[in-house]
Image (cartoon, grey):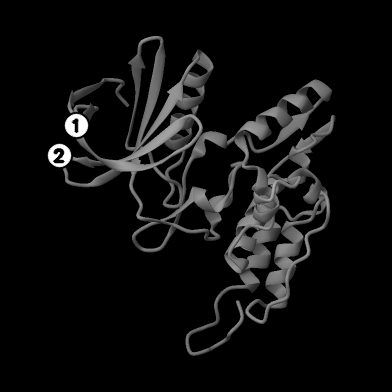
Amino acid sequence: MGHALCVCSRGTVIIDNKRYLFIQKLGEGGFSYVDLVEGLHDGHFYALKRILCHEQQDREEAQREADMHHLFNHPNILHLVAYCLRERGAKHEAWLLLPFFKASCPEMSRSFLLPYRDLKPTNILLGDEGQPVLMDLGSMNQACIHVEGSRQALTLQDWAAQRCTISYRAPELFSVQSHCVIDERTDVWSLGCVLYAMMFGEGPYDMVFQKGDSVALAVQNQLSIPQSPRHSSALRQLLASMMTVDPQQRPHIPQLLSQLEVLQPPAPGQHTTQI
């Protein structure tokens, strides 16, 4: 992708020789903003994510996020339309131009077969045909991390505190142990939190965080799953296995997919009130 960007007029920018019109702000985080823009060359809407880069490391991390988008070509992973770096004196802004989706909603999908590390409902969008699309790839990491000592454990723990949403963070990331292995089962925990939110309307630790209580302590206790006539015992058992505190006891992805096969919708003509 090209790196040439200029502001042509008030509310208009050019990225890769194409002009985009600013429509409105969609949201903002600690160091990033997302704007709705319209491509004047095609009339399509796009989401323009602007990441504030104060240091060289920030620029490298933004470039890494762009590289992650380029790494995948999958209908359930958001693709990158364009990327550029804009100078602002001594500082920079990394601009990621992405497709615009009108809705976000937690959905389970095979797109979670990757080392994501920050799964949560707000990072899952819905496409025009209802397909789930994974966004915000800045927290992706290698599939398996071997922690060899206390220093590396503290480094990983600090990284998780900065990059992984606290109420969806697995217990092993709150207090990383020396000589341990962090693998896909960390994502399985977060995916379990997303499934819980789908079933009950909010994540299992959202209220703990909102009340100011310790999420780090709360996740050390086995989660109690509410009884509901809307949910089958098989679904509750699946959720319980994903939310096991000990990561070594959680299912790997192949096991999880096998359990999901059992929960497929009934054949046409069959009716059920349970999921």
Q: Amino acid at mark 2?
A: His
Can you say which quadrant of the picture contains the C terminus?
A: bottom right
- Between 87 and 209, the residue placed more toward the observer is 209
168 vs 54: above or below: below
Q: Residue at x 31, y 21 (%)?
A: 3
52 vs 217: above or below: above
Q: Residue at x 70, y 46 (%)?
A: 212
Which structural element holds mark 1?
strand
Q: Position of residue 152 (x, y in %)?
A: 76, 23
Marks 1 and 2, Cα distance to the nearest angstrom?
7 Å
Q: Earlier in the sequence, mark 1 or mark 2?
A: 1
- Between 136 and 161, the residue placed more toward the observer is 161
109 vs 91: above or below: below
- Between 28 and 144, the residue placed more toward the observer is 28
Q: Position of residue 147 (x, y in %)?
A: 78, 29
Q: Position of residue 236 (x, y in %)?
A: 71, 70
Crowding at dot 1, Cα within 10 Å, few <14 / some 14-19 / many 20+, comes out as few
Which structural element holds mark 2?
loop
Question: Where does label 1 land, which residue?
Answer: 18
Can you say which quadrant of the picture contains the N terminus?
A: top left
Q: Residue at x 33, y 45 (%)?
A: 99
Q: Position of residue 18 (x, y in %)?
A: 19, 31
Q: Residue at x 24, y 27 (%)?
A: 16
Question: Where does label 2 land, which residue?
Answer: 41
- The answer to which image quadrant residue 102 occupies is bottom left
- Left or right: residue 98 compared with residue 196: left
Cβ atoms under marks 1 and 2 closer than 8 Å: yes
Q: Amino acid at mark 1?
A: Lys
Residue 112 is marked as none
**Is residue 48 among what the camera can see?**
yes
